Amino acid sequence: MSKTADELLTVSEVAQQLRVDDTTVRRWIKIGALEAVLLPHIGKRQGYRIKKNTLDDMLKPLMASVE
């Protein structure tokens, strides 16, 4: 597996790529629509990281419909 495929993205990075709010990405994670790695909970919010290949897989059907 390549380093890019193993790359972990923050909620903010995913939100920027999808042009949605951070809250939307967090909601998708909580309802199971987007798989994420759970980080140890320190502070006010639960921390998540999303694998780049998970995001890519989620976007494949959308990209196929555009082509």
Image: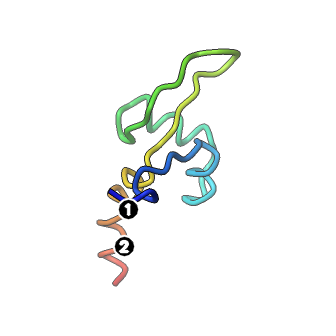
Q: Are marks 2 and 1 in contact (CB under 8 Å)?
A: yes
Question: Residue 7 in the image: x percent, y percent?
Answer: 48, 51
Q: Check the image and report above or below for 62 versus 38.
A: below
Q: Check the image and report above or below for 10 versus 3.
A: above
For marks 2 and 1, give the CA distance.
6 Å
Estimate how packed mark 2 is, as few (under 14), some (14 to 19) or many (20 or more) residues with alpha carbons within 10 Å. few
User: Depth check: 16 or 21 in front?
Assistant: 16
Callout 1: helix, strand or loop? helix
- Going 46% across and 59% down the picture, which residue do you hit? 4
In the picture, residue 57 is in which quadrant?
bottom left
> Outermost residue toward the bottom?
67
- Going 69% across and 17% down the picture, which residue do you hit? 44
Q: Check the image and report above or below for 61 versus 7.
A: below
> Outermost residue toward the right?
43
Asked which colour scheme the image uses, the reply is rainbow
* Amino acid of disc 1: Leu
Question: Residue 51: which numbered mark, if any?
Answer: none
Which residue has dot 1 on it? 59
Q: Which quarter of the figure is the N terminus placed in?
A: bottom left
- Going 44% across and 28% down the picture, which residue do you hit? 30
Estimate how packed mark 1 is, as few (under 14), some (14 to 19) or many (20 or more) residues with alpha carbons within 10 Å. few
Callout 2: helix, strand or loop? helix
Horizontal relation, residue 54 to residue 4: left or right: left
Instruction: Give the tally of numbered discs.
Output: 2
- Going 35% across and 34% down the picture, which residue do you hit? 32
* Amino acid of disc 2: Met
Question: Residue 26 in the image: x percent, y percent?
Answer: 53, 35
Question: Residue 29 in the image: x percent, y percent?
Answer: 44, 34
Horizontal relation, residue 57 to residue 12: left or right: left
Q: Which quarter of the figure is the C terminus placed in?
A: bottom left
Horizontal relation, residue 64 to residue 48: left or right: left
Which residue has dot 2 on it? 63
